[in-house]
Image (tube, helix red, strand yellow):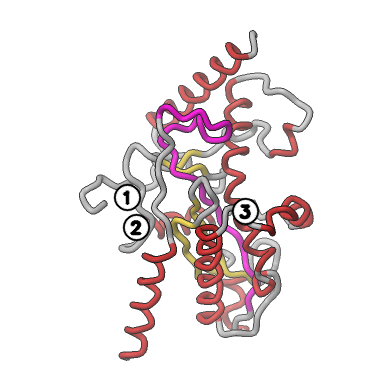
Amino acid sequence: MMMIAKTSLGWIELHNLFLVKPQPIPEDSTDQRWGKFKGCLGALDGTYVDVHVPTVDKGRYRNWKGRIYVNVLGVVDTNMKFVYVLIGWEGSAADSRVLRDVINHTNGLKVPRGTYYLCDNGYPNCEGFLTPYKGVRYHLSEWTSRRPQNSQEYFNMKHTRARNVVKRMFGLLKMRWGILRSPSWYPIKTANQIIMACCYIHNYIRMEIDVDPLEGGLDEYMSTEPNQDVDINTDMIDSLETTQEWAAWRDNLAQNMWTEWNHNNGV
């Protein structure tokens, strides 16, 4: 029992040491990728890691592709550093269900009101979590030779270019650690801890060096990867409910982006 307590305390200490505290995009930001998203803290998404589990548990860990996976939710800042990581949900769990667990967990993700993260449509569009418009052109590959035609398309284009930071982070993580690219034979608890350790070391590397040499080959690696589209006194967001107010806020943001872009391009 004492060993378990010490181990848990050790992981908490590592959380405090290696996970970063994100800073919201300031009002005067002119950053090409993030400047339109004032108050944004970064992006979040889920990925899968192959694992081995007892036969009796395989049904729960089997995702829609039929593979046995553990679900990894990663929350990153604008510089590809982990803010929060949740590992352990079965591969069959929906992204929105995992996020609800994160928000309601005692030591879960804290999102101060007035700030938000970018995420895809596997999550609800609600306070603190900004998704793209459904049924509108979105993925980066769809914008290589086409200009946006309206405010929703322009919003989606800017959204995907910014949110790509979390995709690149997962790509870099798996590119560096071969154990994340194929099933390990470790017990699931040990496998989860190994994944977490890889996330900690990822942050440590990005804290210590200005240019990660692996990033040079990241685009090529990602092109071969299958698409997996997953302060105490501060008032924090504690529910995931879609509202007309939040939807209207997104519409207003999109329209302002579109108006500014048209003005800058003489349209």
Instruction: Pick the residue in front: 145 or 98.
Output: 145
- Amino acid on which the number 1 mark rests in the picture: Asp
Q: Locate the N terminus and report the quarter of the image it occupies.
A: bottom left
Which residue was labeled with disc 3?
211
Which residue was labeled with disc 2?
104
Query: Which is more foreground, mark 1 or mark 3?
Result: 3
Whether tag 2 and tag 1 are in contact, CB under 8 A, the answer is yes
Question: Percent from the top left, x then y, of residue 194?
Answer: 55, 76
Measured in 3D between alpha carbons, the distance from the residue under mark 2 to the one under mark 1, in whole angstroms, is 6 Å
Instruction: Pick the residue in front: 145 or 57.
Output: 145
Measured in 3D between alpha carbons, the distance from the residue under mark 3 to the one under mark 2, in whole angstroms, is 36 Å
Q: Residue furthest left?
A: 233
Which residue was labeled with disc 1?
238
Q: Locate the C terminus and report the quarter of the image it occupies.
A: top right
Badge 3 marks a residue whose secondary structure is loop
Query: Which is more foreground, mark 3 or mark 2?
Result: 3
Badge 1 marks a residue whose secondary structure is loop
Question: Percent from the top left, x then y, of residue 114?
Answer: 34, 37
Question: Percent from the top left, x then y, of residue 53?
Answer: 60, 81
Residue pictured at 57% horizontal, 53% vertical:
210
- Amino acid on which the number 2 mark rests in the picture: Asn
In the rendered image, residue 30 lying in the magenta stretch gets the answer yes
Whether tag 3 and tag 2 are in contact, CB under 8 A, the answer is no
Question: Percent from the top left, x then y, of residue 153?
Answer: 63, 26
Measured in 3D between alpha carbons, the distance from the residue under mark 1 to the one under mark 3, in whole angstroms, is 37 Å
Badge 2 marks a residue whose secondary structure is helix
- Amino acid on which the number 3 mark rests in the picture: Val
Q: Which residues are magenta?
A: 27-51
**Within 10 angstroms of label 1, few (less than 14), some, or many (20 or more) residues?**
some
